[in-house]
Structure formats: structure tokens, C-alpha cells
Image: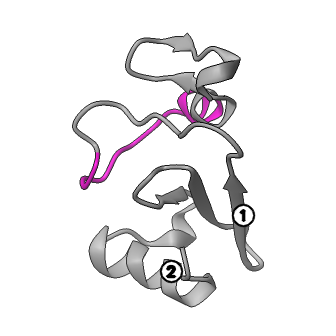
Amino acid sequence: MRKQFNGLWALAVEQLREDPRQGAVFIFANRPRDRIKLLYWDGTGVWVMAKRLEKGRFTWPIGSSTTKLTLAPEALTMLLAGIDLKDGCQKAWYER
């Protein structure tokens, strides 16, 4: 999770083969999945947002550990809210 603006931009372009200027939000997670960074181009500049969970981890859909994943805005909201996208239910507070 050391990468900042330029490093995350380079990952989106070189590894994901996407242009960040097209309006997508790119999410990068660390291995334990307790921290994420979001990269977003708003038309005038780049946003980098970060979230660290105090307990638990973010849950990705099955089979998306190393591949590019496209999420609907609603799915992104659920992911950030702690809803398990595998089962479609919110994790208990003690599992987050």
C-alpha cells in the first residue's frame, strides 16, 4: 500500500490496460484485504482515497484475487459497507 498517485495510475494503465481518464474508479487492496485505495479521475485531477478497517477484512467475489473485476456502483457501495458479495449478506459486527 505504498503506491500513491503516480504508482496507482501506472498500475491501472500498464497492468489493467485501462485509461483512468474514462471515469472508472480503480480499487487496490493489500494482501490481507484490510486496506484499500481508490483511484479516481474527476476531470480536473486525480483523487486517491484510502480506507483501513480496524477489524475484519473486505470481501471480494470468488475468483477475483488477481483478475480485473468490474463492479456496478451498487456493488461498490456494498463492498465498502462491509457486505459480503459472495453471499449477499452483511457480516456480523464481530466479523468485520
Give above or below for 27 relative to 83: below
The residue range painted magenta reads 65-77
Q: Amino acid at mark 2?
A: Trp
Cα–Cα span, label 1 and label 2 = 13 Å
Earlier-in-chain disc, 1 versus 2? 2
Magenta span contains residue 70: yes
Which residue is painted at 63% across and 14% down in the image? Answer: 92
Q: Is residue 30 left or right of 96 when viewed as pictured?
A: left
Q: Secondary structure at mark 1?
A: strand
Residue that numbered label 2 is attached to: 9
Q: Position of residue 32 (x, y in %)?
A: 44, 52
> In which quadrant is the N terminus drawn?
bottom right
**What amino acid does circle 1 point to?**
Met
Which residue corresponds to mark 1?
49
Q: Residue at x 71, y 45 (%)?
A: 54
Element marked by disc 2: helix
